[in-house]
């Protein structure tokens, strides 16, 4: 089996990413050599238009795997030779495995979030879950929730058409369990859990996406923003007594899934998480 790997991340504005550290350290712990290269479109003239060229270059150079992030997760799809079933159904890829010159797309965002939920919030009630934000990450989480057997998924997005489109796509794939709602108060009424998947709470966008008064101590709250790790939403929910999961759990979960696809070896998820939290 191979013990040397060349991997990378393609996206814009990725200089702060903790993924290189997670991938390289887990490889080192397993006695593997793995180099993880940042390929930042903000530093590439032409940006997104360069994506086909970058994939061709990765194939030529002999990369084993690539992670793909904003703004490439959808744009990369038509450039690949094959897709996993979830990636095809979501129309979004965050992990590309290169093997024998073929490019195969996967998506570990949803499965990574699900890993984080099981780890941070075991036994979380999936009866009535609100998903706030139907963008790239929200779509992957919605897919994971449906696979996990969510009872009712209530989707809210500032862009109502996005929430509608996601609910419709889920209806086609999983039957009637998702609804798009315009009003966060209505959506959170009687909810068992909340997944926050908008950029609100990031260092450059502080605050809450919903009024704090809509939270109830009986709800679990999953945050996916992880710069900073402790967002206003998490602080507020924790103070109220909610069980919470921070954005680090998903970041670790997606990296663990990608490591396994890149190397063919299982990652020690607890070790990856300890390392992530020490960074
Ligand atoms: P995106 O831009 O694709 O989607 C964000 C969605 O939120 C959009 O549909 C937008 O209309 C909606 N939105 C924005 N503000 C809102 C508000 N106040 N109320 C309701 N809806 C609102 O972004 P994305 O790629 O899905 O990422 C979202 C966030 O998740 C980012 O901050 C990113 O840092 C984080 N993220 C974390 C992980 C992780 O591993 N933890 C992975 C991916 C993304």
Image (cartoon, helix red, strand yellow):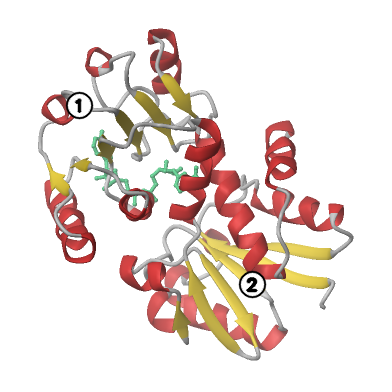
Residue occupying the point 63% across, 53% down? 256
- Establish if 11 lies above or below 239: below
Q: Which mark sits nearer the N-terminus, 1 or 2?
A: 2
Relative side of 7 to 67, left or right: right
Quick one: 239 or 202, which is closer to the camera?
Answer: 239
Q: Which mark is residue 65?
A: 2
Q: Which mark is residue 188?
A: 1
**Number of other residues with Cα within 10 Å of mark 2, as a class: few under 14, some 14 to 19, many 20 or more:** many
Q: Is residue 6 visible?
A: yes
Relative side of 214 to 218, left or right: left
Q: Is residue 156 visible?
A: no
Q: Position of residue 73 (x, y in %)?
A: 42, 65
Residue occupying the point 31% across, 48% down? 149
Relative side of 272 to 57, left or right: right
Residue occupying the point 40% across, 76% down? 77
Q: Position of residue 226 (x, y in %)?
A: 52, 35
Q: Position of residue 88 (x, y in %)?
A: 36, 73
Q: Which mark is residue 273?
A: none
Q: Position of residue 96 (x, y in %)?
A: 55, 72
Q: Quadrant of residue 132?
A: top left
Residue occupying the point 11% across, 31% down? 183
User: In which quadrant is the N terminus drawn?
Assistant: bottom right
Name the secondary structure under disc 2. Answer: strand
């Amino acid at each position: 089996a191979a013990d040397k790997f060349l991997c990378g991340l393609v996206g814009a504005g990725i200089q702060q990413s903790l993924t290189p550290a997670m991938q390289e350290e887990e490889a080192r712990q397993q006695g593997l050599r793995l180099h993880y290269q940042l390929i930042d479109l903000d530093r590439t003239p032409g940006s997104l238009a360069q994506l086909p060229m970058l994939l061709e270059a990765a194939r030529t150079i002999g990369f084993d795997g690539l992670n793909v992030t904003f703004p490439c997760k959808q744009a990369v799809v038509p450039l690949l030779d094959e897709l996993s079933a979830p990636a095809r159904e979501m129309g979004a890829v965050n992990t590309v495995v290169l093997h024998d010159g073929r490019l195969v797309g996967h998506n570990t965002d949803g499965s990574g979030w699900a890993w984080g939920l099981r780890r941070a919030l075991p036994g979380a009630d999936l009866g009535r879950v609100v998903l706030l934000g139907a963008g790239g990450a929200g779509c992957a989480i919605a897919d994971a929730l449906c696979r996990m057997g969510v009872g009712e998924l209530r989707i809210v997005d500032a862009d109502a058409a996005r929430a509608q489109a996601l609910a419709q796509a889920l209806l086609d794939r999983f039957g009637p369990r998702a609804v798009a709602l315009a009003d966060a108060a209505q959506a959170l009424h009687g909810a068992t859990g909340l997944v926050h998947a908008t950029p609100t709470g990031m260092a450059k966008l502080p605050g809450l996406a919903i009024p704090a008064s809509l939270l109830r101590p009986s709800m679990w709250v999953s945050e996916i923003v992880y710069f900073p790790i402790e967002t206003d939403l998490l602080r507020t929910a924790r103070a109220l007594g909610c069980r919470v999961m921070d954005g680090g759990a998903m970041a670790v979960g997606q990296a663990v899934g990608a490591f396994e696809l890149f190397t063919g070896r299982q990652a020690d998820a607890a070790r990856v998480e300890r390392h992530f939290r020490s960074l």
